Amino acid sequence: MANYVYIATSLDGYIATEDGDVDWLSEIPNPNNSDYGFNDFIQKIDAIVMGRNTFEKILSFGQWPYPKKVFVLSNKLKEIPEELTDKVEIIAGDIKSVTAGLNKRGFLNLYIDGGKTIQSFLKENLIDEMIITRIPILLGSGIPLFGKLEKPIRFDLVETEILDDLLVKSHYKITSK
């Protein structure tokens, strides 16, 4: 049972521009049309947990990208588009209770996505592994991957890969809980 982060960030630590735009990610050359390991990653998780802002951004892409059940953390969102009702569920509550509830339902390995959601899980010390791909761009401002913490959380480096002589993908595991 583990909670994972799998995300891309600019060199200065942003996951999106201030208005939530992520178009800069698609501007990166991908000569081999690679998914950079995402398919392998998604196979080992049971479900995805994301915040409302991330969900709404993904809806704007047009085609639903996830083969696994998605749980959207939101107190404001009341309904899911009809074509996604079997793929997406709205959940609310504190992070620990939500995680425990999903684990009881058999969703043991969770992919945590979205800046605020990742930050909330980190504040509760509920992230076990992070796979972060750094994109060689400085955005200067935007939505940060990390926020303020009450105390440091230590991770061990598992592996770092250089992809297409351009991207740096690093895999970290929490040192101890």
Image: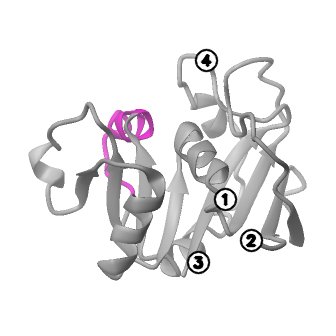
Q: Earlier in the sequence, mark 1 or mark 4?
A: 4
Q: Mark 1 or mark 3: which is in front?
A: 1
Residue on which disc 3 sits: 40
Q: Is residue 117 above or below residue 31?
A: above
Q: Quadrant of the C terminus?
A: bottom right
Q: What colour scheme governs how the chains and residues are painted in the rendered image of this protein?
A: one colour
109 lies left or right of 175: left
Q: Amino acid at mark 2?
A: Lys
* Mark 3 and mark 4: Cα distance apart in space: 30 Å
Query: Label 2's element?
Result: loop
Q: Residues within 10 Å of mark 4 (few under 14, many from 20)?
A: some
> In which quadrant of the rendered view does residue 156 lie?
bottom right
Q: Amino acid at mark 3?
A: Asp
Residue on which disc 1 sits: 125
Task: Report if the CB atoms under discs 3 and 4 are less than 8 Å apart.
Answer: no
Q: Earlier in the sequence, mark 1 or mark 3?
A: 3
* Mark 2 and mark 3: Cα distance apart in space: 26 Å
Seen at 42% across and 76% down, the residue is 46
Q: Residues within 10 Å of mark 3 (few under 14, many from 20)?
A: few
* Mark 1 and mark 4: Cα distance apart in space: 26 Å
Q: Amino acid at mark 1?
A: Asn
Task: Report if the CB atoms under discs 1 and 2 are less than 8 Å apart.
Answer: yes
**Residue 105, how many percent across, how many down?**
29, 78
* Magenta segment boundaries in residue numbering: 53-65
Q: Earlier in the sequence, mark 4 or mark 2?
A: 4
Q: Earlier in the sequence, mark 1 or mark 2?
A: 1
**Residue 72, how many percent across, how many down?**
34, 49
Q: Amino acid at mark 4?
A: Glu
Q: Residues within 10 Å of mark 2 (few under 14, many from 20)?
A: few
Residue on which disc 2 sits: 177
